Amino acid sequence: MTHPVISLDLRDLAPPEPMHRILAALATLSPGDCMEAWTPFHPVPLLAILQADGHAFTVEPVDDGYHVVIVCAPYADGTDGLA
């Protein structure tokens, strides 16, 4: 994985604000760039959107119920920055 170019700490925000901020930040990424976001919950609705849009992502639970989401914008050839 490439080093994240954006890091967001969204743990203090109520839904759906973390999802909106992640999607807005994702729109600024260049192909192959990655971002990380700390969320206060497992972001199930966001993951469906990311998958439908072809973004590679991982979600890892961390202490106190928080999750770290890593999202990469796909390259033009369909590969991603998570490899």
Image: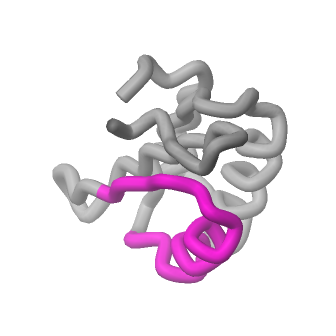
The extreme front residue here reads 77
Residue located at (54% from left, 51% from top): 12
Q: Position of residue 39 (x, y in %)?
A: 47, 55
Lateral position of residue 75 relative to residue 67, left or right: right
Display coloring: one colour
Q: Which residue ends up furthest to the left in the rendered image?
A: 63
Q: Quadrant of residue 1?
A: top left
In depth, the one of 73 and 37 nearer the eye is 73
In the figure, is residue 10 to the left or right of 39? right
- Residue 44 lies within the magenta run: yes
Q: Nearer the viewer, residue 77 or 68?
A: 77
**Residue closest to the eye, 26 or 2:** 2
Left or right position of 24 against 34 = right
Position of residue 37 relative to residue 56, above or below, is: above
**Percent from the top left, x then y, of residue 30?**
74, 28
Residue depicted at 71% across the width and 40% down the height: 76
Which residue sits at x=52%, y=38%? Answer: 9
Question: Where does the C terminus fall, quadrant-wise?
Answer: top left
Q: Does 16 appear in magenta? A: no
**Relative to residue 35, is residue 67 drawn left or right?**
left
Question: Where is residue 16, by image quadrant?
Answer: bottom right
Vertical position of residue 79 compared to residue 18: above or below = above
Q: Give how far across and how far down residue 22 sits, in percent.
A: 67, 51
Residue that appears at 58% across and 20% down: 5
Is the residue 53 above or below the residue 35 in the image?
below
**Stretch of the chain drawn in magenta:** 42-59
Residue 11 drawn at (x, y percent): 48, 51
Counting labels gives 0
